[in-house]
Image: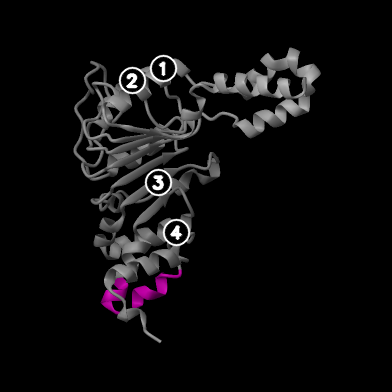
Amino acid sequence: MPSLLSLPDELLVRTFDYRAQRFGTCDNPLVPLLSVCRRVRNAAQSILYSEFILGSDADAMACFDAVVQQNPSVGQLVGRLTIRNTDSTLDRPRLQLSKATIRTFTQLKELTLHGAPFDEASAVLAALPSPPLPNNLGHGVPSRYFQALPAGLRHLQLGSNTFYESELPAYLATANLESIGFEYYTWVTNRLLQELTGRARPPQLRRIRLDYIDVSKSEEIERYFKRFGTASLSTAASEVREDLGPNWPGSGTEAGLRRALASALANGIEGTGSALDCVDWNVEFDRLLVDYLMEDA
């Protein structure tokens, strides 16, 4: 039976990647491989430390801190960083990681801010290896961002309450971002969408994922119709529409999203995400309503 050492490096890394999925850092099955030969150790490390979740298990963060203190080059293996918060006061200390460790993340390519309030996430962002920003971002008022994004960052994922809309476009311009995403119920306005897809867009941006709003699909709408029945539905259609239709956050609207998607298409930016299902949702609702009423007529 051939051994792992007979595999080429690329296949060895892919094998370790498959084996390590859904595990943390310290209890990961790849940890024992760190004590094998240099070739196996390097392959295991490239997977084990490729992603770090700040705000996860406190023991995992302490373990990672200790590893980086012993070998700072490990921090350079981190390509994806997620900063999150569990919304529990008792869990707040779990967001802590030494600034010395964070500064070793020189090869960061993907950053996700998920549920961590801006003030907490900004402390981590300020420790990343990136240059300081000027006192303002072109608005004439002091900026609440202190450091630029890491120059090598290519993808940024933003959750609710993790950014300031008025300063975000200028802040994004500090990195060569290729893609940006907005998670569910993030405060995304028409103005922000237009700035990200129009003339003021980040020059390298090629993809924008819009999951900030969701809407009921055709199957759920039809189930709702059956629950009301034909007799009640003819008078309760507006109520059903309001219950199942898009709940636009902020000053976002269907028309604004439509304009932004048109700008994105014209400027070579691919738009994806659940928000796209909200465009023409009322037209689809009307079609399903007519079909249902006609079937039971």
Point out the frontmost of discs 2 and 3. Answer: 2
Q: Left of 15 or right of it: where is 87? A: right
Q: Quadrant of residue 140?
A: top left
For the N terminus, give its image quadrant: bottom left
Q: Are marks 2 and 4 in contact (CB under 8 Å)?
A: no
Residue at the image position 66 percent from the left and 19 percent from the top: 290
Mark 2 or mark 3: which comes first in sequence? 3
Magenta region? 29-41
Q: How is the image coloured?
A: one colour
Secondary structure state at the residue bearing disc 1: helix
Q: CA distance from mark 1 to mark 4?
A: 43 Å
Label 1 with label 2: CB-CB less than 8 Å = yes
Residue pictured at 47% horizontal, 37% vertical: 115
The amino acid type found where label 4 is placed reads Ala
Q: Residues within 10 Å of mark 2 (few under 14, many from 20)?
A: many
Q: Looking at the rendering, which quadrant does residue 133 occupy? A: top left
For disc 1, the marked residue is 256
Under mark 1, the amino acid is Gly
Q: CA distance from mark 3 to mark 1?
A: 30 Å
Q: Earlier in the sequence, mark 1 or mark 2?
A: 2
Magenta region's main secondary structure?
helix
